Image (spheres, rainbow, N blue to C red):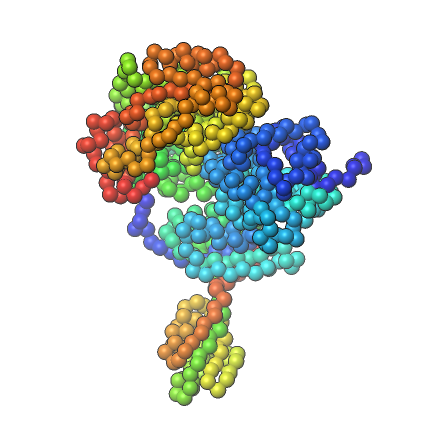
Amino acid sequence: MAREPMNGAQVVIKALIDQGVDVVFGYPGGAVLPIYDALFKQNQLRHILVRQEGGAVHAAEGYARSTGKVGVVLVTSGPGATNAVTGLTDALMDSIPIVCLTGQVPTHLIGNDAFQECDTTGITRPCTKHNYLVKDKNRLAQTLHEAFYIARSGRPGPVVVDLPKDIQFAECPYVGPSNVVHKTYRPQIKGDRKAIEQAVEMIAKAKRPVIYGGGGIINSGPAAAKLFSEFVRMTGAPTTLTLMGLGALPATDERYLGMLGMHGTYEANMAMHDCDLMLCVGARFDDRVTGRLDAFSPGSKKIHIDIDRTSINKNVAVDLGIVGDVAHVLEDMIKVWKAGQKQVDKKAVAAWWKKVDEWRARDCLKFKTDKKIIKPQYAIQRLYELTRDRETYITTEVGQHQMWAAQHYRFEKPNRWMTSGGLGTMGYGLPAAVGVQIAHPDALVVDIAGEASIMMNIQEIATAVQYRLPVKIFIINNEYMGMVRQWQELLHGGRYSESYSAALPDFVKLAEAFGAVGLRATKPSEVDDVIGEMIAVNRPVIVDIAVDQKENCFPMIPSGAAHNEMLFGPDDEAGKPVSEEGMVLV
Amino acid sequence: MNNNAQIERHTVAVLVDNEPGVLARVIGLFSGRGYNIESLTVSAVSEDESMSRITIVTSGTPMIIEQIKAQLDRLVPVHEVHDLTAEGAHIEREIALVKVVAGGAERRESLRIADIFKAAVADTTRESFVFSLTGKPEKLDAFVELMRGLGKTEVARSGVVGIARGAKAL
């Protein structure tokens, strides 16, 4: 079949369409004008114009994490690319598949400090899974397909393709996706059979097992979450999830202990500490999860399933590492378990559950309600109760509100929770919500925000308004950078250096100025009505919830402490000062 | 983590695509994650020049060494990672060019030591020699140390290259 000759920009569009892309988040500029021209001349690809390039990457992350597809970003050279860096780093840390196309000055100007030139591949090398500078027009199509393959396979991540402007104009040959085989990159998908059999033996012998699941389950896809839940039910082991893993097991499952780690539940952390066998599935023993490493689950045998070999034995030495995709490994484990008619030690596990239930009885997430002041936890609890029966997607910014959301909003399904876990990027939630709403136009998408975080990418409300995206921004407004203040209280003698949110805008008026709807609640009695109205309005809404300014996020493992050294509330703080080693940790 | 674990020295051979940016990726990995580089050499090695071999001498605890290998292997343009130290008997060689500026007895002594080490004279003037010496890094260390005592010295070293003994080829 004879094809019309295509220029580089048209090849880019064709490659995206052939990769199944339906939406691109971007911002035009001089070095990508040919691609924007090619976009203009077609109607298969939808372009969403963000208001800053950082927003484009977060929107693509929200889109990717809520669909399991690759999120696509298109930005110009220089500042377009540098503005994307935070989002790329965020996607790398949280393993989100992103292909980010950046414009570049024409090849003959590269290295000459041309207008809007920067060394994009140099700058993004450490914050991408891989990156390319396309200097040969004959390699353009293949490079684009490779970028998608690398972004989505193995441990997903961001890939940058830097496209000089002369390549976009040049006539370029096209090859389809099926003609591309990567010469070196072949991630290991199936787990080692012997190791899987050994894992099953270890689990069957355990007396105090714990299953600890992470974002790898979400990344592997809904099938992985199903298999994970099945395995949890087969073994009956107490199960906890990381921040990135929420939704991998339905929160209402009786075996679910809640999130673990720094602001995890008492029962989850105690179970991790006292278990004799830990099965880690698609998580990475991050410092927010482990607490003090030399006191981390001292008496347990540890099994770790991860698609990324570098995650195994990085922070915590494990007894058995299995490299592979969690869905494949879990499927094989279930088969081996069933074929061997394996049983857990029922008596021992029942005794273990008795212990776990004692920890549970402490009800560590309880908080004092108040008739006059809205407690932040209360606001999130009400949001949960009033939205749980709907098709709801939650994004967050970063800080106290994020932890309260993780504690009090309960997820039944994977891909419903979008948060910046690894990098902790304030300003993530609103653009991410835009991306989620684009992917799920009829769903309820709520960004649980703080008043400080929301200011970091507030401009993206304009994007929501332009595309009539009814995202809801639910601001837990305590007029402080709450988590900063909490640490200053705990570690720096209550000297609240620069953590007060001074000169805040009136969020109701701000919403109106953008063409959105603004609502406010200042009393507990108003919360339900405001949430009801927020849901009823089919437009972007900012909800300003004036909450207790002094509330801190508990329970908490102070930095440098172990899982069994949690603080439960303000009265606990004085008794347990943070160690000097803990002070230096972030 | 176990801080008392023994620090080990490992020589790692990495076969990579011979493309711009690959070396930067490898070096960036080491600096970004705080790993040691004792020496690093790189050159194209395949017949069609499409592949390069990077030899890295590094040190760390066994857990760190395992991480380094896994991290290297994870880089997209990396074909193979071989821990020569762990995989069995291997040969390491390095080349040094050592300039010694000296006269009189020191000058004669430098030539005598060069003879003992089987170093070749690569260049000479009335007040200087440049010696060329190939061998294991420790041998080069000893040679350089002796020369430093004899006059002003300038040293250029290639870094280590290594290859496994035996008939098996990568």
Residue A249: x %, y % from top left: 43, 23
Looking at this view, is A516 or B167 the one in front?
A516
Residue A468, quarter of the rendered image: top right
Would you say residue A402 is visible in this rendering? no
> Who's the residue at 42% across and 86% down the image?
B103
* View extreme (left): residue: A575
Task: Tell me: residue B15, above or below residue A286.
Answer: below
Residue A170: x %, y % from top left: 72, 45
> Who's the residue at 48% across and 39% down the image?
A86
Looking at this view, is A396 or B129 the one in front?
A396
Residue A404: x %, y % from top left: 36, 24
> Who's the residue at 46% across and 15% down the image?
A534
* View extreme (right): residue: A2
Residue A377: x %, y % from top left: 34, 20
Task: Tell me: residue A407, above or below residue B14.
Answer: above
> Who's the residue at 55% across and 57% down the image?
B53
Residue A254, quarter of the rendered image: top left
Residue A175, quarter of the rendered image: top right
